[in-house]
Image (tube, rainbow, N blue to C red):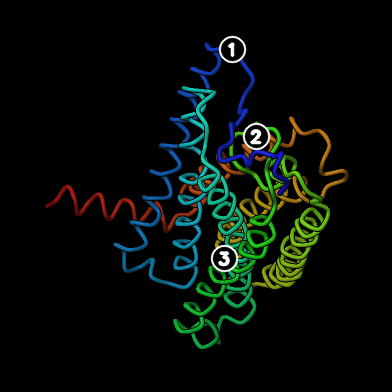
Amino acid sequence: IGNDKTLVKEFILMGFPVGHDIQMFLFGLFSLLYAFTLMGNGVIFGLICLDSRLRTPMYFFLSHLAIVDISYACNTVPQMLANLLDPIKPISYAGCITQTFLFLTFAHTECLLLVVMSYDRYVAICHPLRYSVIMSWRVCITLALTSWVLGCLLALVHLFLLLPLPFCGSQKINHFFCEIIAVLRLACADTHINEILVLAGAASVLVGPLSSIVISYIRIISAILHMQSKEGRQKAFSTCSSHLCVVGLFYGTAIIMYIGPKHGSHKGQKKYLLLFHSLFNPMLNSLIYSLRNNEVKGALKRVLGKTRSS
């Protein structure tokens, strides 16, 4: 870094360029959605821990998805709420880089967990007699840990390329959190390699897993259609439809954000799309799995019944 340049030690998140009244409205709305996200995913995680009937591979992976969704929200929403109250309050360089790293970690981990969950449904429906052997607890724990470790390692690659970059110009990040593309735009050096890596990483982490999910569900749907029992078909469609809704929400917004055409354009639109991805998706995931899943609703009734009787 040249001597005539002053190293930036903090950033200002531009957030939402609206009036004070709308900022207060958004603060109340986002606070409510944040509370629902924490409560919904917390309830699902708690039910899976408390109810022995939910101690199956499917709900084991769902508990990890709930942890990721809670972590997602906790990483971005508090800073966003603080900025709505005080738009010029800065975030430190270390805090910004940490937020970028954690967001990438949770995004990669959720992407991989959704693949693991689709594999679990594939084995359950296409190979039901061998399910307990294939999806043993040792395999389940290994798959979950692999998702977390790979998610962290993939984020570390971006972090190691981001840390050497000098930031010596504008402090203003055109986003409501330290999203990697928005941060790279402020660097005082060539970020071409970083941007190519973001695009390549997103393509490999999104397109590859999504392809495997699609292949799994083609086989799953084929197996369901060949089932003799109407109840069996309905139950299989019910559990799979919840997962497909979550997959559609997650991959749809992520692909448009990072590997859609001209991912550097339409900054405002994509900023709000990522708001949906980081705030609404975690809340909707818990609603989808609780409202569409009879086993989760049954577990909630049993736990509430025990609480009342005690």
Q: In the rendered image, which residue does mark 2 sit on?
A: 175
Among all residues in the image, which is located at the extreme front?
Answer: 3
Q: Residue at x 67, y 60 (%)?
A: 158
Using the image, tell me which numbered label, if any, was put on residue 152.
Answer: 3
Give the vertical position of 43 relative to 145 (above or below): above
Q: Residue at x 41, y 37 (%)?
A: 35
In three-dimensional space, the C-alpha distance between marks 3 and 1, rounded to whole angstroms, equals 38 Å
In three-dimensional space, the C-alpha distance between marks 2 and 1, rounded to whole angstroms, equals 17 Å
Q: Are marks 2 and 1 in contact (CB under 8 Å)?
A: no
Give the vertical position of 172 relative to 249 (above or below): above
Residue 185, percent across and down?
75, 41
- Mark 3 or mark 1: whose residue is earlier in sequence: 1
Q: Residues within 10 Å of mark 3 (few under 14, many from 20)?
A: some
Residue 178, percent across and down?
61, 42
> Nearest the camera: 66 or 14?
14
Q: Are marks 3 and 1 in contact (CB under 8 Å)?
A: no
- Mark 3 or mark 2: whose residue is earlier in sequence: 3
Amino acid at circle 3 = Cys
Among all residues in the image, which is located at the extreme right?
Answer: 261
Q: Residues within 10 Å of mark 2 (few under 14, many from 20)?
A: many
Among all residues in the image, which is located at the extreme left?
Answer: 310
Q: In the rendered image, which residue does mark 1 sit on?
A: 19
Residue 224, percent across and down?
67, 68
Amino acid at circle 1 = Gly
Q: Secondary structure at mark 2?
A: loop
Q: Residue at x 49, y 77 (%)?
A: 140
Q: Residue at x 53, y 46 (%)?
A: 282
Amino acid at circle 2 = His
In three-dimensional space, the C-alpha distance between marks 3 and 2, rounded to whole angstroms, equals 23 Å
- Mark 2 or mark 1: whose residue is earlier in sequence: 1
Q: Secondary structure at mark 1?
A: loop
The image quadrant of residue 188 is top right
